[in-house]
Amino acid sequence: MAHVAQWKKDEVKNLQNLIDSHPVVGIADLADIPAPQMQKMREALRGNAQLKMSRINLMNLALNQSQKNNIKALSDFMAGQPAMIFTDMNPFKLYKILEDSKTPAPARAGSIATADIVVPEGDTSFLPGPVLGELQKIGIPAKIEKGKIVITEDKTIVAEGEEISSDVASMLTRLGIYPMEVGIDLQAAYEDDTVYTSDLLTIDLDKTIQDIQRVYSQAINLAVNAVVFTEESLPLLISKAAGQSMNLALNADILTTKTTDIILAKAYAQMLALASELSAKDGDALDSELQKKISAKAAPTTVSQDKEEEEEIEEEEEEEEKEEDAAAGLGALFG
């Protein structure tokens, strides 16, 4: 039997302890991350997660020796320069933190574009010279204008999925365009016997919140219509019942402390309407007081009226405002 170095045994044991003591274990790819960016990402994780790099075979041994159910499935996601992440955060939050910590990076020759690389229209810092030919050589439309080289229109020089040539990579850097991202790529994360791959962890936070809010509103609506009593639906159901009882009392002319004023205002309005119809048919059918009330409703106050008439009309206008408010209340109830 081949001798196994003690440091390897200790490393596997340490990794196994970390696996068993954290509810979430992730596998990340650290390939092509410069040291300064790696330091920044470690700082972003500090206090939230522990990043551990080791040999692939030692990490696999630690996963195989763990007692967690299905944890061994993480071995399938070790690619590039793998590392393990140990945390108490749920996988979705961990993924978001890692994505937010990514930084722009210059294009490298031979890399594959993860999205269309577009050189925007506008001025450059280049003075007239050989660089104009270099721009045109790689397909960037440019010309000399007011003593500077100007890019005349937006130009996609590398499509998503295509390889970036050395000439294009060099020119993008000179233009100050950094189309790549450098960061820790979370390949998969384990929690509660389940392995979540990166495609499952990629969620639109704003859309998710909107979906939850929409579903919540629909659930409240269902609970109210089905008369299901919950902490959220109970106030709405009581309010709905109060409105329905008020509507019933008004339609049945049941006098209560809340309906009396509305019913009287309604009756008063109906009385004026009937009196107006009678007056139209027979001008002598109404007494002078009622005729004044109808006239006051039909015509605005004039300057020639004496003080006593003005006060009387003002009182009638106040009564009319009450009637209109009552009618609005009825409209809301019957609506």
Image (tube, rainbow, N blue to C red):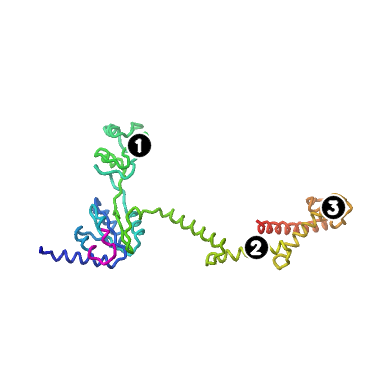
Residue tagged by mark 1?
155
Residue 240's label in the rendered image is: none
Residue tagged by mark 3?
278
Residue tagged by mark 2?
244
Of badges 3 and 1, nearer the viewer stands 3
Query: Quadrant of the rendered structure where residue 158 is?
Result: top left
Residue 39 in the image, given as x and y percentages of width and height: 26, 57
Residue at (28% x, 42% y) in the render: 173
Residue 15 in the image, given as x and y percentages of width and height: 23, 64
Whether residue 248 appears in magenta in the rendering, the answer is no
Q: Name the quadrant of the N terminus.
A: bottom left
Q: Secondary structure at mark 3?
A: helix
Q: Dot 1, how many residues are within 10 Å of its Cα: few (below 14), some (14-19), or many (20+)?
A: some
Residue at (29% x, 47% y) in the render: 105
Q: Amino acid at mark 3?
A: Leu
Q: Name the quadrant of the C terminus.
A: bottom right
Mark 3 or mark 1: name the one nearer the start of the chain. 1
Mark 2 or mark 3: name the one nearer the start of the chain. 2
Marks 3/1: CA–CA distance: 82 Å
Q: Would residue 18 be found to the left or right of residue 311 on screen? A: left
Q: Which residues are magenta?
A: 63-74
Q: Dot 2, how many residues are within 10 Å of its Cα: few (below 14), some (14-19), or many (20+)?
A: some
Q: Dot 3, how many residues are within 10 Å of its Cα: few (below 14), some (14-19), or many (20+)?
A: some
Q: Would residue 7 be found to the left or right of residue 275 on screen? A: left
Q: Amino acid at mark 2?
A: Gln
Residue at (30% x, 46% y) in the render: 180
